[in-house]
Image (tube, coloured by chain):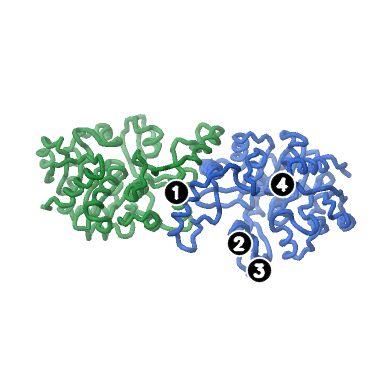
Chain colours: A blue, B green
Amino acid sequence: MITVLAGGVGAARFLRGLVAEIGPTSVTAIVNVADDFTLHGLSISPDLDTVRYTLAGEIGSLGWGRADETNAVMDELSQLARVAPATSSATDWFTLGDKDLATHLYRSQRRAEGATLSRITHELCRASNVEVRLLPVSDDPIRTIVELESGEQVSFQHYFVALRHAVAIRGLSFEGLQHAKPAPLVLDSLRDAERIVIAPSNPFVSLAPVLGVAEVASAVEQRREQVVAVSPIVAGRAIKGPAADMLGQLGYECSVASIARLWSPHAATLVIDEADADRAKDVEAHGMRCITTDTIMRDIQSSRALAAVVSKVPLP
Amino acid sequence: MITVLAGGVGAARFLRGLVAEIGPTSVTAIVNVADDFTLHGLSISPDLDTVRYTLAGEIGSLGWGRADETNAVMDELSQLARVAPATSSATDWFTLGDKDLATHLYRSQRRAEGATLSRITHELCRASNVEVRLLPVSDDPIRTIVELESGEQVSFQHYFVALRHAVAIRGLSFEGLQHAKPAPLVLDSLRDAERIVIAPSNPFVSLAPVLGVAEVASAVEQRREQVVAVSPIVAGRAIKGPAADMLGQLGYECSVASIARLWSPHAATLVIDEADADRAKDVEAHGMRCITTDTIMRDIQSSRALAAVVSKVPLP
């Protein structure tokens, strides 16, 4: 049994490789919910959906949304939105395809009926024949607030999608994190796992709000020797998304050494890419063992090869 | 200037004829909102949408939804809903086409931004190039509760769609009606109109919650001489929907005489179909003038002919 702390695209690709390697029923994913937001009345959980769509083989080619998607609703909405006030979000700045919308309608209706996010996620996984145990880190709302260099505070989706993460940030905070409780089975799956993996996701916006849930942090720290983290930074760059820019903006060197500094309290082992082999000593200087392999997940084969290393590396 | 008190399909057809006869900018429609409901997180206003789609020439052939509609979202949702608990409404019992969904997404987002239903309706009319002034009777929520013969209380949509109005009812009530205030321009449009028309809509579920707004009722009663009602009952039957069944179930004879009894406090004139010419005396016995014409709106020509009679009948 392996439990993975997961964000969106990078974690989803890693999980797909891990499922190929050890089978779906041996895998639990504890997924970030701090990107979740409400738009057009709908409850949207981007990371949970990216992971589920990927594991169901339904993910769009860009790493989000659905494959073979149509856009009938958004095409019509963009006609209506021409008359919206300039300050309104009733526009098509956030694209939701038709198949993807069905997920959000389902989730929104079930939430209105009082179902928890973890219960709904379980139902959606059954509908998609996803056998991995997919858990939101919490059923309580956690929301990322991005403080821009200008001092303006915006939601994560505004920063990530509307601003295309092309602006410098000064800091991050997480509404609701302080009082968030782990969802059912989260602590069990951390306690019972043979090993815990910190996926190659953005440490600031994907994993900080997972490891920021107090009981999750202490459960992971108690198992530090069994925790293997995978660096999302390769040769000073992020494979996808703003992780590299954020490191610099938040005062870190953009390298695997900074990833080691971040995960050292939680993980005894860090897996880095061969391109960073010369930085292994810096990782070890942070009190972590360092494993070097090819970490770039270009396709299912390379994802599986990475998962094989992560799931077999001898624990200290 | 003519102001029409309106429900859904029957009122929409009448309004289309009236627009053909006197032009869109001379027409105000005050529309029922008691059928409004929330599903899948979305704010749905069936009567406002039916009227708007009809006036925009976009109405589906069944009298609701959109023409040239697709169902990509519902097709996918019906796959997901297989796993929903039996008690859940996260199913496809209420069909929402893709183009229609865009309206509900727009409305839901604008409501979340604090816009009133009347403001949103104005925006949607602009987007659809509908020049008729379309007003929800109130920006406050009004919700029809149907008491079934079994004593069970259900929402209007549950009765109308899920139960296909094929069950007997014992009574109707309207949550929020007592404290509902007229939306902006509603009272003005009643005061300033040359004449007021009560459309051939269901008197119990479409017009009662319009005329049940206290200030609307007294504004209409003050202008009783200028009010012309059109009977939705022809030869003891309703053209569409459960109006005829409801008359019987609520203790009324199913005839134009009962419509006269209902509208007599509000309207000085009742327009009935030629098929009911023999009941004119019964209408007059309720203190109303009775006008006989062809009231069945088979097409735009017959709608326009009815509108011509209603808009020209000399007032008392």
Query: In the rendered structure, which amino acid carries the disc numbered 1?
Result: His
Residue at mark 3 shares a chain with residue at mark 2: yes
| Mark 2 secondary-structure assignment | loop
- Which amino acid type is shown beneath numbered disc 4? Ala
**Badge 3 is on which residue?**
A149
**Is label 1 in contact with label 4 (beta carbons under 8 Å)?**
no
Please provide percent x and percent y for residue B31: 31, 50
Residue denoted by label 2: A163
Dot 4 or dot 2: first in sequence order is: 4
Q: Is residue A177 left or right of residue B96?
A: right
Q: Amino acid at mark 3?
A: Glu
Q: Chain of mark 2?
A: A
- Tag 4, which secondary structure? helix
Residue B267, visible in the rendered structure = yes
Which residue in the protein does label 1 denote?
B104
* Earlier-in-chain disc, 4 versus 3: 4
Marks 1 and 3 belong to one chain: no
